[in-house]
Image: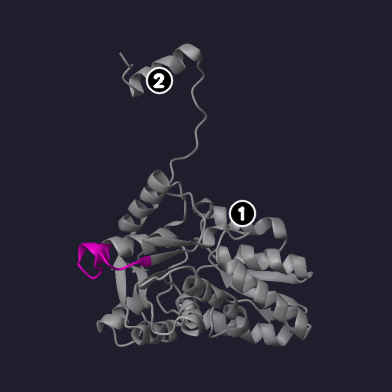
Amino acid sequence: MWAKAEWINPTGSYKDRIAAKTMDAAVRCGARGWIGTSSGNAGAAMAAYGARAGLRGFLCVAADAPSEKLQSVAPYGAAMLAMSTLGPPEMDRIEQLALEYRLQLAITAYRYNPEGMAGAEAIGEELADQGAFTHAYVPAGGGGLLVAVARGLARRAPGRVKLVCAQPAGCAPIVGYLSGALDAPVSAACTTTVSGLQLPSPPDGLLAAGAVRESGGWGCAVTDQEAWDAQRLLATREGVFVEPAAALAVAAISRDVAEGRLATSDCPVAVLTGSGLKDLRRVAPAQRPSPGGLDDLGALLAAAFTMPT
């Protein structure tokens, strides 16, 4: 399997691609500033590219977003307002305010910001150029990234790659809709703790489901624990530290291998969407090492290795 390294973008996630196109549109249309929503990654990207464009920013953030994500927004000077819910009703109202105050709408969903979302379509184009992949595993919250990857692939490799929608079992409306368990891509509840994927009513849910079906792919829901296990595996085996939402795509590949949905001849790629530095809640709190000296170092090494004879 392969992975797409979206966590190495300037602000640590694929949202930089969307932010660049969003602020380009804002400058071209003469917007007075920008306004958007975020659980963290989009906020940092919009704030950074908005600062570069010289535009004032206003960001509605999820109240339970990891502190690391909110701290990554702060340096760029955007105004932040914490909100307990950030679903379509709130987004619709923010869209109205954007029109009223002549602000660029900076929500990362095709439903609200198709010009900006076009920036993420390059991910699909690059995947088509970078390898003969059979399946693309894409983590989905609002569904926009999956739609973008599908559109990029369709331009460069039509019909070649099956799309798999990876969602946490505690909030998997698109997966449920694809399986027929739900009549619409809307969940009654959201219990996952995976930041960025906590959208029970994804704004691009129908578009995402349509893209998956058209590609011949499917949906895969995994537990939060499976995502955390995949995160740990990537870090300790590959030296790659990504946030749980990204690792969830790898967990979905593992599950599909175990369940026989992937064959040994398949070549899947996981889109690793964001850096692990954006969410450190599952990492043990940093502690200063205990004071010691070279004798302690020798004892540590002796306990770890058998001395050669």
Query: Residue visible at 20% across and 66% down?
Result: 259
Residue 264 highlighted magenta (yes or no): yes
Q: Position of residue 238 (x, y in %)?
A: 42, 48
**Residue at point 56%, 63% (across, down):** 41
Q: Amino acid at mark 1?
A: Gln
Amino acid at circle 2:
Leu
Q: At numbered mark 1, what does the secondary structure look like: helix, strand or loop?
A: helix
Q: Is residue 265 visible?
A: yes
The magenta segment: 255-268
The vertical placement of 157 against 277, above or below, is below
In this orientation, which residue lies closer to the viewer: 135 or 229?
A: 135
x%, y% of residue 198? 43, 68
Q: Is residue 192 magenta?
A: no
State whether residue 263 is above or below residue 276: below
Q: Earlier in the sequence, mark 2 or mark 1?
A: 1
Q: Which mark is residue 71?
A: 1
Which image quadrant: the C terminus? top left
Residue identified by numbered label 2: 300
Q: Is residue 187 visible?
A: no
Relative to 203, is 222 above or below? above
Identify which residue is drawn at 67% across, 72% down. 20
